[in-house]
Image: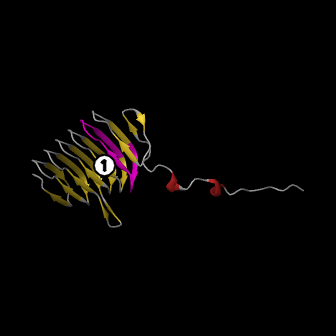
Amino acid sequence: MTATLAWPTAAFAAPADLRPAAENCVVNGQPQSGPEIYGTSGDDDIRCDRLVSGDVIFGHHGNDTIRVTFNRAGVINGGDGDDTIRLEEWSIGLIQAGGGNDDVIASVNDEIDGAKGRIHGNQGDDEIQVLLNEGEVDGGEGNDICRVNEGIVLNCNP
């Protein structure tokens, strides 16, 4: 008689909250693990597939390009410089463009289970484009142009 031992694979799997939450992040071509993703004092190219609550991208100084596919309650801060922040899919996190003349492009600034996406241009003459807005868009200080389909829009020129 042969006995077969069955080991529950779930007992040996790492809990989901122990892995870095920011997924597949690359800064200037180099992989970087989360939950905090840092740019440099120069111009940066930062890309992440997914952010969740507790994840933060800091662009710092320079003219940064930041691209995030899904932002589930993470924070993106472009910092000083003329940044481009692109949200490829939906976002319910906080986007702070930072100081400078920034471009923010979002497919969906969403609201899910009471959590609203927020996009803030901060200081500078920013351009913010949102295809579907169920959250809040605030151009902040400066001469901001917002092209936003519905939702809450503050401090923007039409």
> Which quarter of the figure has residue 109?
bottom left
Residue hosting label 1:
76
Secondary structure at numbered mark 1: strand
Type of the residue with mark 1: Ile
Q: Position of residue 123 (x, y in %)?
A: 15, 48
Front residue of 80/125: it is 80
Identify the residue at horizontal 39%, vertical 55% (top origin). Answer: 54
Q: Residues within 10 Å of mark 1 (few under 14, many from 20)?
A: many
Magenta part of the chain: 48-68
Percent from the top left, x then y, of residue 111? 31, 62
Residue in the picture at 14% in, 45% down? 124
Specify whether residue 24 is painted magenta.
no
- Residue at x 10%, y 48% (from the top left corner): 142
Farthest residue, direction bottom: 114
Q: Nearer the viewer, residue 5 or 56?
A: 56
Residue shown at 35%/53% (left/top)?
74
Q: Provide residue 58's location: percent of width, then percent of height.
A: 31, 44
| Furthest residue toward front | 41
- In the image, farthest residue toward the right: 1
Q: Is residue 127 above or below residue 9?
A: above
Q: Is residue 115 above or below residue 123?
A: below
- Check the picture and name the quadrant holding the N terminus: bottom right
Above or below, comparing residue 137 to residue 102 in the picture: below
- Numbered-mark total: 1
Name the image colouring. secondary structure
- Report the side of 56 relative to 139 (left or right): right
Would you identify the image quadrant in which residue 155 lies?
A: bottom left
